[in-house]
Each structure stands twice: as C-alpha cells, then as structure tokens.
Image (tube, rainbow, N blue to C red):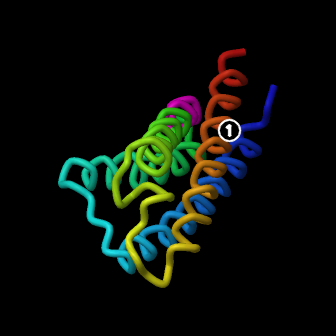
C-alpha cells in the first residue's frame, strides 16, 4: 500500500510545477495579446487553476481519495483543453499561428511543458486512485 504522504508530496509538487508553468504561459498570452472567451476563462480559472490546488490540499487530509480523483480529473481536463487549443483548433492560441510578439518562444515552450505537467498530474492522480482502492 502506498503511503498517503508519498502521494501528497508527488501531487503537490506536480501542482506547484504546473502552476509555475501556467503563470509563465499566461504571461506569454498577455504579451502576444491572445484573448480567451468568458467561457474559456471560466474553465481555466476553475479546472486548470483552482481544482488542482484544492486537490493538492485534499491529498494532505483524510480526503486523500477525493483529492486523487480531483487531481486526475482536473489535470486530464486541463490536458485536453490545452492540447485542443494549442495543437488542434486553428486560432491565435495555436502554437503554429501565434500573433507577433516577443514571447512566442516562451508560449511554445510552456505549451509543451503544460502537456507534460498535466499528463504527470493526471498520472499521479490515477496512481493515487488505484492505490487507494486496494
């Protein structure tokens, strides 16, 4: 059986790294003038920003399983949202169709790092869910 502390540490590190990457990505968005719709901003604020933080906090409490589920679901949702907007939908938010600006490189780098951090966070959450079920 996995120790809850191990999951809490791994989940918290994943959320903190994801947060740093997201802040840098947001700075690139601002520099490039890439605006999101109100619905997209709501999704970003709830699923990409707040839910992983709530999940990380829950991992340190008696609600470890709920935290693992929330971490897996929020990071998977973030991954799907980012992958669609950065690599599928043709828009100014697509890595190959960015507006002119100084932070195009940072935008592209953080888009990739978001995929990596969100996949890792989803995996950690899933790992916690599976281990807690045993």
Q: In the image, what residue occupies the spot 63% across and 58% down?
A: 113
Query: Which range is magenta?
Result: 64-70
Name the residue furthest left: 38
Q: Nearer the viewer, residue 8 or 50?
A: 50
| Prevalent SS, magenta region | helix
- Is residue 68 found inside the magenta-colored segment of the image? yes
Q: Where's residue 123, x and y in %?
A: 67, 35
**Does 31 sit above or below residue 9?**
below
- Quadrant where the image shows the N terminus: top right
**81 on left or right of 104:** left
Is residue 26 located in the magenta-colored stretch of the structure? no
Locate residue 132, reporting x and y percent.
67, 24
Residue 75 located left or right of residue 48 = right
Q: Nearer the viewer, residue 50 or 6?
A: 50
Q: Residue furthest bottom?
A: 102
Q: Secondary structure at mark 1?
A: helix
Determine the residue positioned at 53% across, 30% down. Answer: 69
User: Seen from this angle, which residue lies furthest top?
Assistant: 134
Q: Nearer the viewer, residue 133 or 41?
A: 41
């Amino acid at each position: 059986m996995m120790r809850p502390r191990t999951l809490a540490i791994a989940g918290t590190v994943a959320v903190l790294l994801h947060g740093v990457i997201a802040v840098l990505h947001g700075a690139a968005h601002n520099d490039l003038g890439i605006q999101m719709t109100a619905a997209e901003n709501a999704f970003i604020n709830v699923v990409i920003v707040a839910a992983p933080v709530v999940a990380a906090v829950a991992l340190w409490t008696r609600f470890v399983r709920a935290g693992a589920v929330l971490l897996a679901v929020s990071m998977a949702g973030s991954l799907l949202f980012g992958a669609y907007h950065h690599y599928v939908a043709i828009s100014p938010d697509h890595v190959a169709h960015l507006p002119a600006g100084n932070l195009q490189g940072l935008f592209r780098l953080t888009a990739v790092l978001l995929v990596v951090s969100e996949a890792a966070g989803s995996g950690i959450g899933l790992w916690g869910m599976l281990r807690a079920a045993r």
